């Protein structure tokens, strides 16, 4: 999602931007847009509140905004946050599972390593011991 936004911002012409935007809508709509939109709203809202309170000037949000944020907070804690954590753990573990240095030519078994140091246990737990 973020890479699509970066590509959209880097596009030189409006037709190219429109084609990227159209492709994003076709690929991500509706669930991924809701998921990542709610996640970034959650992060932005709480970052703004945290920064404002550190500066000693808390933000007075409207009642409607606070009601919407109650729903987004519940969704972020129950569904979105765990999904983001699991996705991060899966990407981290799977990207570090394969290595190609110091491998005997043609021996595919040596290309995969078992990641079992103690500091990887939390990552293994959140990706259901995938690696």
Image: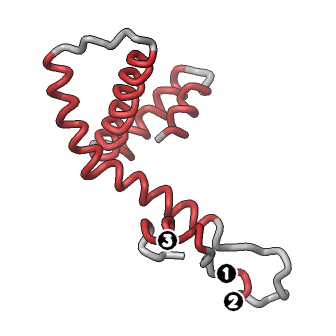
Q: Earlier in the sequence, mark 3 or mark 2?
A: 2
- Label 3, label 2: how far apart the Cα atoms are: 21 Å
Q: Is residue 18 left or right of residue 59?
A: right
Q: Nearer the viewer, residue 48 or 72?
A: 48
Q: Which residue is mark 2?
A: 109
* SS for dot 3: helix
User: Looking at the picture, does residue 110 appear above or below residue 93?
Assistant: below
- Label 3, label 1: how far apart the Cα atoms are: 16 Å
Residue 24 at x, y = what percent?
A: 42, 39
Mark 3: few, some, or many residues within 10 Å (few <14, many ≥20)?
Answer: many
Q: Which residue is mark 1?
A: 112
User: Looking at the picture, does residue 32 appear above or below residue 63?
Assistant: below
Q: CB under 8 Å between callouts 3 and 1?
A: no
Quarter where residue 12 is shown:
top right
- Label 2, label 1: how far apart the Cα atoms are: 6 Å
* SS for dot 1: loop
* SS for dot 2: helix
For the C terminus, the quadrant is bottom right
Q: CB under 8 Å between callouts 2 and 1?
A: yes
Mark 1: few, some, or many residues within 10 Å (few <14, many ≥20)?
Answer: some
Q: Which residue is mark 3?
A: 124
Residue 65 at x, y = what percent?
A: 20, 21
Residue 55 at x, y = what percent?
A: 45, 13
């Amino acid at each position: 999602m973020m890479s699509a936004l970066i590509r959209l911002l880097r596009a030189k012409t409006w037709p190219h931007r429109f084609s990227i935007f159209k492709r994003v809508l076709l690929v991500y709509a509706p669930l991924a847009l809701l998921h990542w939109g709610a996640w970034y709203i959650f992060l932005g809202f709480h970052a703004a509140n945290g920064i404002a309170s550190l500066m000693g000037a808390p933000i007075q949000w409207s009642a409607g905004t606070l009601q919407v944020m109650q729903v987004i907070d519940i969704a972020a804690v129950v569904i979105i946050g765990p999904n983001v954590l699991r996705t991060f753990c899966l990407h981290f573990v799977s990207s570090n599972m394969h290595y190609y240095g110091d491998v005997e030519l043609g021996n595919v078994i040596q290309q995969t390593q078992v990641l079992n140091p103690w500091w990887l246990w939390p990552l293994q737990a959140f990706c259901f011991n995938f690696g």
